[in-house]
Image (cartoon, rainbow, N blue to C red):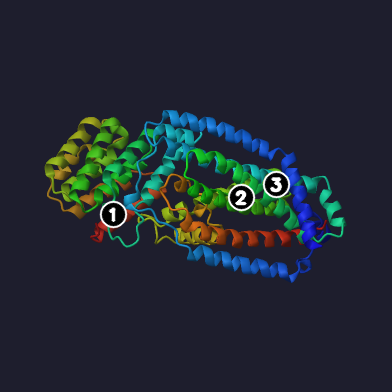
Amino acid sequence: MLVRAIATVGRFTLIEAIHSRVALAALIVILAGAGLGQFTNMLALTDSTGIQAATLAALYRMAAVFLLCSFTIASVVREHNDKSLELIFSLPLPRAAYLLGKWLGCTLAALVLAGLFALPLGFSAPWPALAAWAVSLALELTLMASASLLCALTFTHVVGSLTAIAAFYALSRAMGALLAIASGSVAPLESAGFQAANWILQAIAALLPRLDLFTRTAWLTGDAQPFADLGLIALQSVVYTALLLAAGFIDLMRKNV
Amino acid sequence: MFDRARHWRDERALARVPGAGWLVLALALVAQIAFSTCTPRSAPSAAELAPPPSVATVTVASLGDPLPAAKIMNLLLQAHDNQPGLSIPFAKLDFLMVMRWLDRIIELDPRGPYPLLAASRLYAEVPDPARQRLMLDFVQRQFRADPDHRWAALAHAAYIARHRLKDLALAREYAHSLRLYATSPAVPAWARQMEILLLADMNELASARVLLGALLESGQVTDAAEFRFLAWRLNQISEGKP
């Protein structure tokens, strides 16, 4: 019963993604990116394939994250605003089933998007590295969809949720660089203010997902070994998705709908 | 009042959440903290200092506003000293590459004081004469491009040449350039008269006290972080640390 309910909500979420033209927007980005890649390819004096792969991979990753997060947030906020959520909760459907169903639908959309965005990179990157890149992108998108679900359920506003998710993504990706800068030899280590700020930074870093490990462009250009980190990436995805879903479940259970 | 607040929050009591939800949250939180603290983060190293991005790349990447990117590039370059286990990390860097980065940052942000401060007070102070000369040469080259704003870096370069390299001729050359080219009224008199200071029989600490002390007391250092950094350097020199 619970599994069927989850599957139903998931199916309708996926249908909504199709109707929201997420795939169409992805195809437009892919075509625009292909044009940009061809342009950079023509400009490059050497390493043209590497430059094309790096440019496209970075663009496609950002586009995939933006499209999926926008869709997830818009979907949940719309259901909240047009009272569909109230209708759903009036049915004999556990709230957990709604949350897991939404997550399942978004995860399926994440898999489709990861596949769509990985395919055109096949022309400029080796297939084993590309497979690892696509798997990592799918896991990154799943994690970001879970974060978007939590933000949308908590804030119930598109602008607030998108802002929060953008900050979350940027901070998670840049945290490694921030920590490295903070531990430089000219940092004022004796200052109590700096020590407090550094401690807060370390605490935030411990709570954020290690997105700097995910979907690295260096895999496609042969500058890093992709398969060494895939296990860690999968483990991080499982742990953080569980954390986000648990937080989302608690928030949903507290809603007076 | 209580009811209104409760209605606005539109939330049920925490007790309505099943215990399993809290349990999963607590377990996932512990697992996340364990994962995050146990997974090593890769630190940038000297060998990995890549060439700086081109002006066009930085401009495109910063959506047409390269100044903030130049400021961040200062911090990224500085972060490359972060190599656990090395006692003199700056001395291990590829200084030709460091100079390319500094050149690029100045190109993007010509009025920014950071690159020349880093060049004269961080990189030019490594205990390696060849690297020191490279960096002093860089400071002099950049000083010539805008003497009235970059005189402080060359004044410090003269001090390094005199007391670290023991090269009085080079120090006098820098001091001479200061007198000739740094002609703005904003340049303090002591900077233009550095030749006299260099010729006086002063030891390194006394010279540092005169130069850094004069700079700090002149009121020209308005940035609190720069003031702290210069005071810290003066303190290090007083304790005999390089």
Q: Which chain letter matches label 1?
A: B
Tell me: B154 left or right of B49.
Answer: left
**Quarter holding the N terminus of chain A?**
bottom right
Name the amino acid type tagged 1: Leu
Percent x, y of residue B180: 20, 31
Percent x, y of residue A242: 64, 62
Are the residues flagged by discs 2 and 1 from a single subunit? no
On the image, numbered disc 1 is attached to which residue? Answer: B234
Q: Distance between the residues labelled 3 and 1?
A: 54 Å
Towards the viewer: A125 or A39: A125
Towards the viewer: B25 or B164: B25
In this rendering, the count of numbered labels is 3
Tell me: A251 left or right of B136.
Answer: right
Name the amino acid type tagged 3: Ile
User: Disc 2 vs disc 1: which is toward the camera?
Assistant: 2
Q: Would residue B24 be visible to someone looking at this image?
A: yes
Question: Which residue occupies 58% across, 36% down?
Answer: A30
On the image, numbered disc 2 is attached to which residue? Answer: A141
Q: What element carries label 3?
A: helix
